[in-house]
C-alpha cells in the first residue's frame, strides 16, 4: 500500500511539474547553433555538418529543416537585428569572413561587405530600422553602408565600441577610460554615463550593466539613459558565496531580461555549486524575478518574437517555454 501511495504521489507530482511549462521538443539530425526567429512558428539556425556551417530554416509544425545557403555560412554571434525588419533577409559571415546577405524567400545570396586578406573582421553587423542600411564596427569605428548602392560612411571614429543598436541609432563607447552614450544622428555630442559598460535595450531607453561588489560578486544594474536613475536587479541571498553573472539577452520588446549566474563557494576553492537562469520583468520603476530555472544544461537561449516565450536549444533539441 505504501509503495502504491508513493507511486501515486510521484505521478501527481510529475503531472503538476510538467503542467507548469509548455515545452515543445523538436529533435533533429541537425546541430542547432545561434537560433533566430523570423515568425512565431519559424526560425533560422546555423548547423555545423561535414566540417562546414550552413544556414537552415525550420517550421516548428512541419519539423523538417530546409537548407538555405549553398556556401559556408556562419551567423553573427550577437543577437541584434541580423534579420531585416520585414523578416525576409538575414546577414551572415562567409568562410572568408566577408559579410553576405541571404534573401530567405528566393534563396539568393550577395556579398555586401567584402573582406580583403589580412583585413580585420567587421563586427556587430546589423540592419538599420528601415532595412536599407547595414551598420557595422571595423577597427573600433562605426560605419554604415547603403545596401543598394554600396556607399559607405564613417559615423563614429573615436573610442572602443561596447554596444551598437542600429535600429535606434545608438551606441555605447569607451573613451579615455570613461563610458559614453552616443546618438548616431549626433555623434559629436556623446553623453557621459556613470557605468562600466552596458548593453542597450531594444528601444534604446535603458542599459544593463554589471558591477563588481566588494566581495568579488557581479551584480546587474539597469540605468535609464535619460535620467541616469539606476536600479539593481534582485538576485537573492548569497551567504558564503560569490556570484559570476552573465547577461544573455533582452526580450524583443525590452520588457524582460534573461541572465544566468553561477554561485561559487569560497570554502571549496572556487567550486561552482549552483547554475541558475533567471528571467526578470521590468514594469515602470520596478523589477521582479518571474522565473528561475536551475541547472539549465542547454547551450543557447533565444526569445520568440512575441517576448512571451523562450527557446532553449542544445545540439539536437529545442524546448519552447512560456514565460509567465
Image: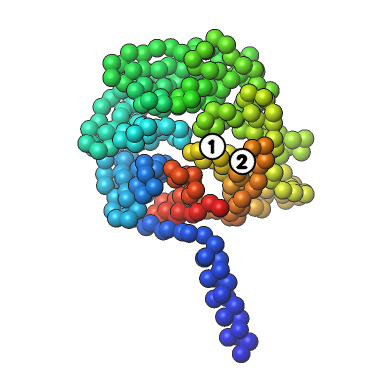
Please give left or right for residue 137 compared with residue 179 in the image: left
In the image, residue 163 sits, relative to residue 257, either above or below, namely: above
Residue 81 screen position, x and y as percent: 42, 32
The disc at residue 155 is none
Please give left or right for residue 276 compared with residue 34 in the image: right
The answer to whether residue 187 is seen in the rendering is yes
Residue 14 screen position, x and y as percent: 54, 70
- Neighbour tally class for label 2: few under 14, some 14-19, many 20 plus, Cα within 10 Å: some
Q: Quadrant of residue 107?
A: top left
The disc at residue 254 is 1
Residue at the location (46% across, 59% down)? 23
Residue at the location (69% across, 28% down)? 229
- Could you tell me which secondary element the residue under label 2 belongs to? strand
Q: CA distance from mark 2 to mark 1?
A: 8 Å
- Could you tell me which secondary element the residue under label 1 belongs to? loop
Residue at the location (22% across, 32% down)? 108
The answer to whether residue 115 is seen in the rendering is no
Q: Are marks 2 and 1 in contact (CB under 8 Å)?
A: yes
Q: Quadrant of residue 48?
A: top left
Mark 2 lies on residue: 282
Q: Quadrant location of the N terminus?
A: bottom right
Please give left or right for residue 320 compared with residue 42 in the image: right
Residue furthest to the bottom in view is: 1
Q: Mark 2 or 1 closer to N-term?
A: 1
- Neighbour tally class for label 1: few under 14, some 14-19, many 20 plus, Cα within 10 Å: some
Amino acid at each position: 500500500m505504501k509503495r502504491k501511495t508513493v507511486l501515486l504521489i510521484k505521478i501527481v507530482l510529475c503531472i503538476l511539474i510538467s503542467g507548469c511549462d509548455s515545452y515543445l521538443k523538436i529533435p533533429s539530425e541537425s546541430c542547432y547553433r545561434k537560433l533566430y526567429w523570423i515568425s512565431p512558428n519559424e526560425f533560422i539556425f546555423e548547423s555545423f555538418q561535414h566540417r562546414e556551417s550552413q544556414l537552415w530554416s525550420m517550421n516548428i509544425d512541419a519539423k523538417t529543416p530546409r537548407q538555405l545557403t549553398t556556401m559556408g555560412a556562419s551567423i553573427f554571434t550577437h543577437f541584434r537585428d541580423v534579420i531585416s525588419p520585414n523578416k525576409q533577409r538575414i546577414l551572415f559571415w562567409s568562410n572568408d569572413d566577408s559579410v553576405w546577405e541571404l534573401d530567405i524567400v528566393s534563396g539568393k545570396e550577395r556579398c555586401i561587405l567584402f573582406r580583403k586578406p589580412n583585413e580585420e573582421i567587421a563586427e556587430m553587423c546589423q540592419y538599420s530600422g528601415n532595412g536599407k542600411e547595414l551598420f557595422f564596427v571595423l577597427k573600433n569605428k562605426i560605419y554604415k553602408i547603403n545596401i543598394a548602392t554600396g556607399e559607405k560612411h564613417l559615423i563614429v571614429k573615436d573610442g572602443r565600441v561596447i554596444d551598437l543598436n542600429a535600429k535606434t541609432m545608438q551606441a555605447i563607447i569607451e573613451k579615455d577610460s570613461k563610458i559614453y552614450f552616443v546618438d548616431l544622428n549626433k555623434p559629436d555630442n556623446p553623453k557621459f554615463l556613470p557605468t562600466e559598460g552596458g548593453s542597450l535595450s531594444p528601444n534604446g531607453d535603458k542599459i544593463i550593466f554589471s558591477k563588481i561588489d566588494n566581495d568579488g560578486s557581479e551584480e546587474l544594474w539597469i540605468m535609464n539613459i535619460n535620467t541616469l536613475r539606476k536600479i539593481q536587479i534582485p538576485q537573492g541571498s548569497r551567504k558564503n558565496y560569490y556570484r559570476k553573472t552573465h547577461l544573455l539577452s533582452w526580450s524583443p520588446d525590452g520588457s524582460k531580461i534573461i541572465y544566468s549566474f553561477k554561485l561559487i563557494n569560497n570554502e571549496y576553492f572556487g567550486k561552482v555549486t549552483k547554475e541558475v537562469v533567471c528571467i526578470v520583468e521590468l514594469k515602470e520603476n520596478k523589477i521582479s524575478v518571474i522565473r528561475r530555472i536551475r541547472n539549465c544544461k542547454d547551450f543557447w537561449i533565444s526569445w520568440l518574437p512575441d517576448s512571451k516565450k523562450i527557446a532553449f536549444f542544445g545540439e539536437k533539441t529545442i524546448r519552447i517555454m512560456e514565460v509567465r
